[in-house]
Amino acid sequence: MIEFKKKASETLDDIFNLVESKFLNYEVDYEDENLRIDSLEGKGTYIVSIHTPTSQIWLSSPMSGAHHFESRSPESIEWISTRDVNINLKQLIIKELGSE
C-alpha cells in the first residue's frame, strides 16, 4: 500500500507540473490526495484523486466522465483505464486539456 501511495502521489505531482507549465488556460490546485484542474474559460473542472481502497487513481472529467486507472505492475509508471487498456491517464488529460 505504501508503494501505491508513493507512486500515485508522484503521478499527481507530475500532472500538476504538466498542467501548470503547458496549459495556461487552466488553474491547478493540489489538496490532500486530490488534484483540481479548473478551466479559466468556464469549460469545467477535472478532479484527479488517489483512491487508496482500490489502489487506483480516479478521474472526473467534464468531457469524458468518470474513469478509474490502475498501475499494471510495480515497475510501471503508467496508469491504465480499468475499462479500456488503450486509455492512459496522462495521455487522456493532455488530449482533453489540449482540445478545449
Image (cartoon, rainbow, N blue to C red):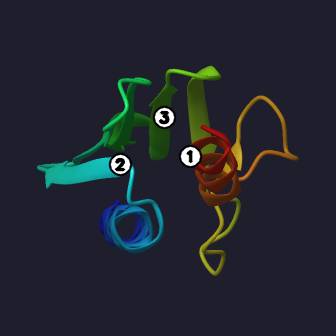
| Residue that mark 2 sits on | 26
Location of residue 78 (image quadrant): bottom right
Q: Which secondary structure, mark 2?
A: strand
Query: Is 6 positioned to the left or the right of 7 in the image?
Result: left
Amino acid tagged 2:
Tyr
Residues at marks 2 and 1, CA–CA distance in whole angstroms: 8 Å
Q: Which residue lies under the disc numbered 3? A: 59
Identity of the residue furthest to the left in this view: 32
| SS label for mark 1 | helix
Q: Give me the C-alpha separation between circle 2 and circle 3.
A: 16 Å
Looking at the image, which residue sits at the far front? 41
Q: Are marks 2 and 1 in contact (CB under 8 Å)?
A: yes
What kind of element bears circle 3?
strand
* Foreground tag (2 vs 3): 2
Amino acid tagged 1? Leu
Residue 63 to residue 23: above or below: above
**Residue 1 or 97: which is nearer the viewer?**
97
- Residue at the outermost right position: 86
Tag 3 and tag 1, C-beta contact below 8 Å: no
Q: Label 1 belongs to which residue?
A: 97
Q: Locate the N terminus by quadrant.
A: bottom left
